[in-house]
Each structure stands twice: as structure tokens, then as C-alpha cells.
Amino acid sequence: MARPGQDVSPLLELDTADQGTPTGGSGTPRPSPRHSPQIFHKILMNRSIRLQRRFTVAQTSFDVENGLPSGWVPLESQTGPSSGLVLQANYGHGQRRGSFLYRSDSDFDTSPKNASRNSSITSDIHTEDMIVTPFAQVLASLRTVRQNVATMANQQDQVKSNSWRTAGGASGISRQVPLEEGSQKMGLETLEELDWCLDQLETLHTRHSVSEMASNKFKRMLNRELTQLSEMSRSGNQVSEFISHTFLDKPHEMELPRGREGKLETMGQITGLKHSLSGISTVDIPVFGVQTTYETELARELNHINDWGLDVFRIGQYSNDRPLTVCMYSIFKSRQLLKTFKIPVKTFITYMLTLEDHYHLDVAYHNNYHAADVAQSTHVLLLSPALEAVFTDLEVMSAIFASAIHDVDHPGVSNQFLINTNSELALMYNDASVLENHHLAVGFKLLQEENCNIFQNLSKIELQNLRKMAIDMVLATDMTKHMNLLADLKTMVETKKVTSLGVLLLDNYSDRIQVLQNMVHCADLSNPTKPLHLYQAWVDKIMMEFFSQGDREREMGMDISPMCDKHTASIEKSQVGFIDYIVHPLWETWADLTYPDAKEILDNLEDNRDWFQTMITRSPPSMKSSASDREDDADDEPDVDKAIVEDKSSEEVMTAVEDSALLEDSALVEDKSSEEDMASVEDSTLVEDKSS
């Protein structure tokens, strides 16, 4: 059955050809489109045009309950910028180092023509891009099947038009010319490709989403990478455990602390709420939302509110530790959200000050500075030219609001710590995204405080939509959901590239919130993409928080969580692993979505990763490390010949070390065949326990 608005004439012609062509008035059969190159080509062209029209429709807003708005119109009739997201070809992939997602996965290399799935998305819009998500691979493979069938049909028509030739001159004996060997080979390859697609589809579980296929694949690949990392050294095992425990959703193992006595308190109200005395005068409203004697310096810093890499530490320094209020006030003013949603300025500032009071300054990392950084990063991502006019004002405000509240009242410990200690919060939220649920509860509860309801003038449906979006975005900041988010986004991007001529419509709530969730998640994991001096400051703070949790676990007689033991933690290696296995794949996918807007962000990320990689070999062992830890660190470092080191200057030594690291990373040792090369490798002893 044809879809509404679909041209059915070509379908009728095809159906007629299948059922036997009726004779016309002259008694000759009507030519079948399958047997006429001209008609067949015309049908393909018409279908391409229909697809082009179908997939160049933009969506400007979406109502959670009512779906598409009444004013939804095609792109061609719009005068303003499109809110459809055009997926540009990523020309920088060949030059930039790809993440582990683009490495070979043996379980998915079963097709004889896997190159058609893994490396071909070609159209008028896209150059060659890699395909790594299983569902997009199936679609790309089916597209190859269709192209092959169309090619063979066209070849068959040409052969049939010249198939009967006279053999033996005037004898009148005719013979049929067989199809070319190329067509036969293409037919066999097409059947094999189709069989692979059917095998993949038959293994699908009806209750699982297609993005879950990618999630399971990515998790399997990450586990393989972490297994190899853990086998390299003790510190490698430490980094592997940290990434696995933090970013992979695994069943919880309950470990109750010893010596807990007394009855559990009732859970009748949200914990963490306190009375705030923050507010502003009813007469004067400060220029930046807070009282400060450094207005000139603060104004200079806020000139970069739209730039990637804003120094929130300076903002806090010049605002009496109020970076969140200052940044949010500046963002809402610049976007005219206060005016659009009729938010009273005094109410907004009062709420922001109250919210900021519920962030704990004694928590090293997850405090109001981190909240300000994530909110400002989300604001900058929303300014991306690729996302211009894509999201409504309500969606924009929801994303920035969610970023501001996403870690409020954070206690400075992980979800797993709360679960293992049988905490009140873990019991209240049934061990599921414990902190994320708590942040949402506190953030929305504070709206009920006196003169704090910044959404008082929103309509009922607007408030419902905002709350739903904020909940979905904050819950997505649970790091154990990372692989699912990455797989969802990767699947959506690659599927649209294969099927929709490169236009991501975002015409339903699921797709729109998926992009917003990943945006806030990217902002939450944006520290490694910032200027190096800011990244270093954030690393110091997160490690202080980790070590504080480790000290508490040691005092309670618990197993110390990965990367939380200050005596054994390898900070530089943890950051390299964090970038390689978590941050880089995520930002790489976001860069595909908004290409080329995130190019500088990826450049920063690679530069920072390289800096921490060099620090692994340069940093001396920690004074707190035990002798065994020092030996382990020595094992991890490339072993440069001592005789060479004594004869070389410090600059030459570092060059030798860096060259050794390059040899280790690229695994080029196996390609060495000459005895001279092998002797050099044995001298440097860089290839011990290494395999391709």
C-alpha cells in the first residue's frame, strides 16, 4: 500500500509487470519498467526526488503531549534558517586519530562485503564515512543490495535487447547470449550480503531498541580494550577498573559498613534542603546579579561568556564565590529568556543564589564552580551554527536550567559509595541514579521557596514540558548510562546518514531530547576539551574529591574504589585512559553531528591528551607511593638504554622517550624484519610483553 502523498504510478507499473502485461488496442504488450532502461531510470529518479522532498522538512518545535505543531511547514516555504540538522561530511576523520569505536570488531566482520557497511556512506551530500553501529550497517548493506539489484536489472535489460543473434548466417538458428561473469559475481555477492542482513535481523529481540545493538557492541569493544590495558601493568589495571566501575552499568554488590547501629530515619521529605538568607534588595539590582567590588574585572571575564574555555575560577574570584549566579544571569539576559518567559529579575536572582547555596564549597569538584562550567558549556554548544534555530526557547531554557541544577547538594561521593553504605538517599531512590534523582528533587523543590518560582508565568503545558525535559537531561548525567547515550547518538547519526540524505529532522520528542541529553552529557565531560591550564585545575579538584572518598572508605573498612587511593593512584594514566575510552568517542560523535563546529574542541582534546601522555614518562613517583608502586611505575615507562642516556643531553633523552612511546602506541615492532631493526628493539627493550 502506498504512503499518503506517494506517487503510485510507478508502483502500479511494477505491479502490472508482475501480474502479466495487459494488451493494448494494438495487441502489443505494454513495456515493463524492469525491461526498459529509460522507464527504469525515470522511476529511480522520481523516487530520489520524492525522498529528497520527504527528508528536507524541518521541525521548529515539539510538544511532549500534542506532537507536531499546527504551523509545521516544509523547508522550501520557510524564509528563516532551517531547524533541520544537516549532517555534514567529516573530512577531518582521515587526519585525526579515531577512537576505539572504529577498530575492527571480529563479531561483526562476518559478511564477505563488510566494506560496504563499514566504510561507505556516499551520496551527493556525504563523502566516505565510517559506519560502526550495527543497525546503520544493516541499512547500508541493504542499500548496497538494492543498488546491485538495480545494476543487474539494467544490465539484464541491455543483454536481452541484444540477446537473439543469428548463428550460422542464413540458417536462422538463434542462441541466447549468457549474462556477463561480472553480473553473476555481483549476484552471488548480493545474495551473501542479503543473507548477512537476514542473520542480523533474526537475532534482534523485539523488546530491545536498535540503539541497544550498538550499546552492546560498544560495551564489548570497551571491555576488550580495558582487558588489554589491565594486563599491561598494575596502574593500567587501576585505570581499567576505574573506567569500568564508573562508566559501565553493572549489577551492584552491596557492602555494608561495620558497626552501624540505630533505626533508619523516616524518608518523609527531601534531604539537603536548608533555609537560605540569600536575596537582593528590593531597590537596586546589581549589574551582574551579585554585589562585587570587582565589576570591571568581572565585566572583562564575562565578555567571553559565549566562548569555549571561559575561566569560571576567575568569575568566582571576582563575584565572591558566586560563579553560577553570575553566569546564569548573563546567559539568560543575553538570550532574552527573562523577557520571553516573563521571569522577574529579582525572582531569578533569588532562586539562583538559593540554588548556589545548596552547592557545597567544601566539596572539591562537584560544587557551584562545576555547575557554572557545565551551564556555560551547554550555552556555547547551543550557539553552534549547526544547531542554529533547531531548538525552541523553551528547550534552550530547559537545557541550561538542567545544567545548573544537575549536581546540586552533591555530597562529594559516588552513587556506588551511597549504595554500598546503605545510605538514606540510596534507599529513597532504590539504588537507581541515586544522586541524579536527588539533584532533580532539590532543584525543583527550591522553586517552592519564597520568591524563587522563576517559572511562575509559564503555561501549564510549558511547565510540564520543561520539567519532563529537565528530568530526562539530568538523569542522563548518570555516568553509568554513558555507553547507552553514546550508542543512541551514534546510531541516530549514522542511520540518518544512510537513510535520510543527511538531514536529521528531529521531528519527534525522542530524537530532540536525545540530542539535548548528549549535549548536557558532553558539557558535563568537557574538562579535557578546555584550555590546558583549566583542565589541569579540574583534574586536581576531581582527584582531591576521589581521595577524600577513598579516605572515608579506608576508615570504614571498605574496599577503596578505583582511583580513590591516594597512595597508588596514577593520575596521568587515568586521564589518558579517560580520554581514550570515554571522552574522545563521545566528542567524536558530537563532532560528526555538528561538523565542522567542534573541530577546535577536538584539537584541544588531542593536545591535552598528548600532554598527559608525555607526563606519564616525565613525572617522578609519588612520595606517598610504596616501593612496589615505584617498581610498577618503572615497569610502565619505556626502558631507555642507560648508556645512551648518560651520553645524551636532556633534550635528546626526551626525544628518545617520545620516539619509544610512538613505537609502543603504533605497535610497529612486528613489522620489523631486518636483524639491525631487531637488535635496536632489543637494546631499547620496548617490546616486552607487547603484541599486535
Image: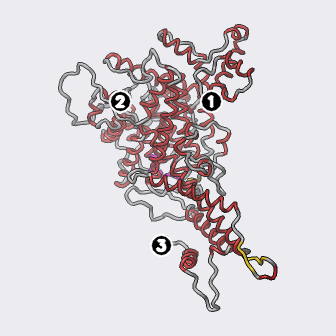
Residues at marks 1 and 3 touching, judged by CB atoms closer than 8 Å: no
Which residue sits at x=67%, y=9%? Answer: 642
The secondary element bearing badge 3 is classed as: loop
Q: Mark 1 sits on what residue?
A: 607
Give left or right: position of 387 versus 458: right
Range of residues picked out in magenta: 390-397
- Whether residue 461 appears in magenta in the rendering, the answer is no
Looking at the image, the residue that sits furthest to the left is 263
Q: State the image coordinates of residue 55 (x, y, percent, origin top left).
A: 56, 61
Q: Residue 459: name its quadrant.
A: bottom left
Callout 2, which amino acid? Gln
Q: Residues within 10 Å of mark 3 (few under 14, many from 20)?
A: few
Label 1 vs label 3, nearer the camera = 3
Q: Is residue 556 above or below residue 339?
A: above
**Coloration of the structure image:** secondary structure
Question: How much space separates mark 1 and mark 3, taking CA atoms?
Answer: 55 Å
Label 1 vs label 2, nearer the camera = 2
Magenta highlight: main SS: helix
Q: In the rendered structure, which disc, 1 or 2, sits on the residue that comes first in sequence?
A: 2
Give left or right: position of 530 versus 208: right
Question: How much space separates mark 1 and mark 2, taking CA atoms?
Answer: 32 Å
The secondary element bearing badge 1 is classed as: helix
Q: Mark 3 sits on what residue?
A: 1
Callout 1, which amino acid? Asp
**Which residue occupies the foreground of this view, 451 or 560?**
560
Q: Mark 2 sits on what residue?
A: 416
